Image (tube, helix red, strand yellow):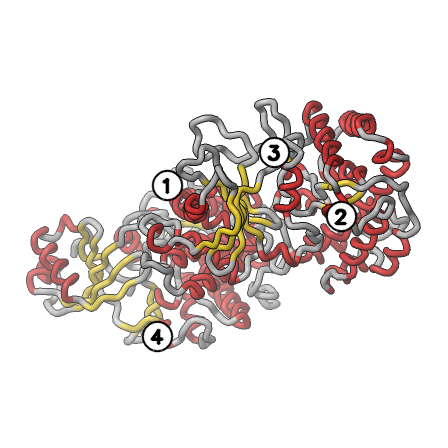
Amino acid sequence: MAESAAAVERSVFRDFVEHALSHGEMTGGFHNRNFRVSLTEAMARCVGSEPGVAVTVRRRLPDPSPVVVRTWQDESAILGALQGVLPHVPRCLGKIGDVAVHSFVEGVPLSSICGNGRPVERRLIDALAELLVQMVRVRREALPALPSGWPDNKDSRGFLRTLALRTEQQVRKPNWAQFGGLFAALGVPEDAMTSFARRVPPMARRPFSLLHTDLHRDNVIFSHEGDPLLIGVDWELATYGDPLHDLATHLVRMQYPDHQWEEVKDAWYTVMRRVRPAATNGVESDLRHYVAFERAQSVYPDVIRAAKSLGTEQGPSDLKGAAVAVRRALEAACAPLKLGRVPGLKEIQSVLRRWHAGQPGHRVRSGPAVSVQYVRPGELSDESVVEALVAEGAARAHQVFRGTGHLNTVVTVSGVQKPLVVRRRLPSADSRREPCYFDEHQVLDSIEALGGVVRAPRVLARGVSEVCEPFEVHSYAAPCPDGVKVPEPPSHPVNGLRLSEADDLVDQLCALTAIDAAALDATVGDGTFYAWLSDRLVELVDDLPKRSRQLARVLGLPDAGRLKSILSSRSVSPRKTVLLHGDLNPWNLVRDDSGRGLVIIDWEMAMVGDPLYDLVRHLHLTPHSAEVKGRMFRRWAGKLAPQYTHHWEQDVRTYRWIEIVRSAYVDLDRLVTGEGTDMPNVRRAVDSYAMTLSAAQASLGLSSARTVNSHLHLALPPGEHKPRATPARGPRAGR
């Protein structure tokens, strides 16, 4: 029997393949098309078999959007290594190009008698465990050569990191040009998989073996003969490494009911303990890491397949079904990839619709239906706004910036020299703990009337697109060199301001006093801002979800009633109110190294209040040296009239105190809910929460005897410290 096309008369082989592709019974999955056909007399002679024997002609599909990791490219070489160890798996009878002829495995897929999600009977679980474990008997020498840089035998941590990095190289990178903007809009960052690889913890050492890695119900044949009961097929994704990885992929892809995970794990442990005891080292501690990886990497194939399922017709087909699949993938990957909030179905449908409209060939027929309510004369037209929205869907990942309240996409439009920003309010903004008080475009229009002394984006258009989805088109805040259509992402002073930037920011804050604050909001009068701010913080604490309030109580933070009493014990001097930015963290400041100074963006949390508060809040959110802090306060006090600065020195501590207290509640809630934790400013805050809590407890005069870290694990989002559907306990006693 030959194992390559070289042993088969090429003309006979080609004729047989052509016959099979035309007349065979076709089945297939994502990567191959399989055709069941009987051997012709000529082909039977070539492969040393009998005419009429059933075989499978297997054709590998072109892979323009690769969604799987391959260790070896030639499945036939893997099948050859299995002979004698797993003799009932398919044999490769001949191969030419991307087509191979395999022996046919008699039986039916397990999925046809026991569908996904249904319980699997015990005898089948035992047979599956035997199949998984039998692979450890395949000799390493019989397998094809491994890629360079493969981890050493027993290096389980290195193997998992290799899986993550090969996912980055073979799946994420090749698809990023077409799908990167879609992933960015959904909240999956470019470095998600490399960050996962960096976080892989130390693991127990287990001897490596051959792994199938794709043993789900469609790839397991229930044998007609019953000996063996189950046979594994489709070995193209096989690899060589830690056998615990095979158990994890099997658990997830078989879609067992949750209650069966422990049963499957125990069956695997029992058989593996008998065949290769060392492979069971650290099962209880390490299985969750492989389960986390399986769910993390699945976000790429699942989202890509869902997007491609929308088709190429004028309107995307089955948009709701695709959104359900995407949300399921994001929910599974959320904890292992630290994605933060998972968008809702409506938001995902909108993202998919825009992406679909922006794909080549769709633009004319399926562009968004737009109602332009305002367009700046002389700079844009209704047509250029529509073009901007189509370009939004086609944007690459580096053009998409997702914040806690808005999705921003940098686009270029014909006839407009500089880039534009399509800005959409995210549905999650409506449920944020810290509310918005104005329509942002009103604030930006007021700032623009100052004539450029405060540098902020300009509103160029507003309207509604698609299914009643509001949008705005802003000028692009970051510098854009001549001839560059889409500039690099903006630079932010994340490690603090330079001295010239500190002076510039103070000057811009002082310039805000020229805006008639009372015309924007007359509810906060001079001298009443601290009381108003305190009431808003008390309302925030009172509105926290139950789990956040419970944990706050465990950590010693006062409830809303007690907090109101504590806050009311302080006061500040009356000062004239002005327009405030409200959230001057470093990511809301954009550098312009050409010398123009900082551009202040994201005015969505603007408010009217005490000008001292904006400066103190900025210094609370941004790391600065004592020298820079002192310089900013002195410049601020020296430039403003006394009505804005009266007794400011004694009130700095009060505003700093209330910001520390606010952070103790807001950041705790972010830890509990995961809301916004994919944003760099939020990530920085929650990563230092232990220090924030200690500072808040001290400033509130509370006991610091409680051990902060002993309770912080309770604040982790579900799934971060306990993977969903992972068996709750390890192998039973006595194993």
Which mark is first along the chain, 2 or 4? 4
Please give left or right for residue 501 compared with residue 406 in the image. Answer: right
Q: Residue at x 43, y 71 (%)?
A: 116
Which mark is first along the chain, 4 or 1? 4
Circle 4/circle 2 CB separation < 8 Å:
no
Q: SS at mark 4?
A: helix
Question: What kind of residue is marked 2?
Answer: Ser
Question: What kind of residue is marked 3?
Answer: Val
Q: CA distance from mark 2 to mark 1?
A: 49 Å
User: Disc 3 designates what residue?
Assistant: 590
Q: Position of residue 354 (x, y in %)?
A: 44, 53
Which mark is first along the chain, 3 or 1? 1
Q: Which mark is residue 112?
A: 4
Question: What kind of residue is marked 1?
Answer: Pro
| Camera-nearest label, 1 or 3 | 3
Q: CA distance from mark 4 to mark 2?
A: 54 Å
* Above-or-below relation of 216 to 421: below
Sort mark 4 into few (<14), some (14-19) or many (20+) by Cα contacts within 10 Å. few
Depth order, front residue of 85/488: 488
Q: Which mark is residue 147?
A: 1
Q: CA distance from mark 1 to mark 4?
A: 36 Å
